Image (tube, helix red, strand yellow):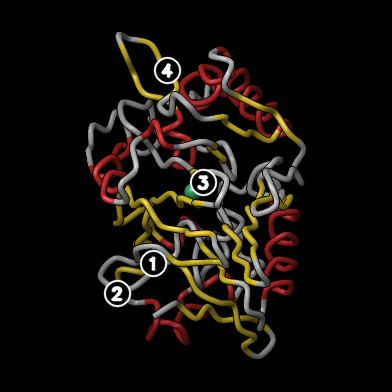
Amino acid sequence: MSWMTIGDVGIARVLESNGPFMSIYDFFPDATAEALAPHRHWLDGSALDPANDMMLMPIQSYVVRTPRSTVLIDSCVGNHKSVGWFPAWDKMDGHTWQANLAALDLRPEDIDVVLCTHLHVDHSGWNTRRVDGRWVPNFPNARYVFSRRECANAERMWQKYQDPVWVENVEPVISAGQAVLVDDDHEIDEYVHLEPTPGHTPGHCAVHVAHRGQDAVVTGDLIHSPIQCHYPHWNFKFDFDKAQAAATRQAFLERYTDCATRVLTAHFPLPSTGHVRRDGAAFHFHYDA
Ligand SMILES: [Zn+2]
């Protein structure tokens, strides 16, 4: 994908990585071989490695260029971050994400607004980078728009479980005076607004982009895999509030099924974007060509 357009707004992906994450049976405690069987023909080799049933997932950002500003949605894992629970992401020192940003002819200085659908490590990492042992904002000219509720949760996760996202990816931005804390239905401008989609985390927000009768929605982690279009009640084992996550996912799929809204997912296999269509009592994801 290079740039797709929504009216006069351009949207492009910035890929950081693409590969195995964890077993689908570990990821979705409700998954069974019987439930997967009728979907193997489209899952295998795409969202799933048939050799070991590992989920295959990209980690990516979306850049939204409106006539007013350049908005970065979700900032992947980043470099040198502490991710004790997932060694592949721990203390990374990669150049893929920066190279892919540059390939769009963008420098960190060009980002005007940073949005995080939620404050997990794979959606907030490039918020900061390490300079002389300190975390500093990676986008010097950006205003970082954080959900107030999500920030409070990230701080709580640090205090309670020592989850380092708060101290590495969020608090340094607030200390630098570049953060704006907002409600979960905040409007960035006439092109971009947040949609509250709680459950995966308390302040999780989807991002809606609209112009001239066209629209797109960036899902973040309200849904992780196209198999959840068929089984919307399957929760990721780390969904914060399982009942709320399932209700949000079902409502989202109902809302955006069989309509022109383009759905931009975080972790569906590339191209990760497409449309939700009704399929019997559930849904199916039709990828963009
Ligand atoms: Zn994620």
In this view, the residue in front, 63 or 281, is: 63
Work out how far the residue at label 4 is from the one at label 2, CA to CA, in angstroms.
39 Å
Q: CA distance from mark 2 to mark 1?
A: 10 Å
What residue lies at 38% left-to-right and 26% top-to-bottom? 82
Instruction: For label 3, count other residues whose C-alpha is less than 10 Å away and answer few (under 14), some (14-19) or many (20+).
Output: many
| Relative image position of residue 65 (x, y in whole percent) | 49, 51
Mark earlier in primary sequence (3, 2): 2
Looking at the picture, how far across and down is residue 23, in whole percent?
Answer: 39, 59
Picture residue at 64% right of the left edge, 69% below the top = 232
Which of disc 1 and disc 3 is earlier in sequence?
3
Q: Nearer the viewer, mark 4 or mark 2?
A: 4
Residue topped by disc 2:
45
Which callout, 3 or 1, points to the residue nearer the camera?
Answer: 3
Mark 1, residue position = 269
**Tag 1: amino acid:** Pro
Is the Cβ of the residue at disc 3 closer than 8 Å to that at disc 2? no
| Dot label at residue 136 | 4
Question: As displayed, is residue 244 above or below residue 287?
Answer: above
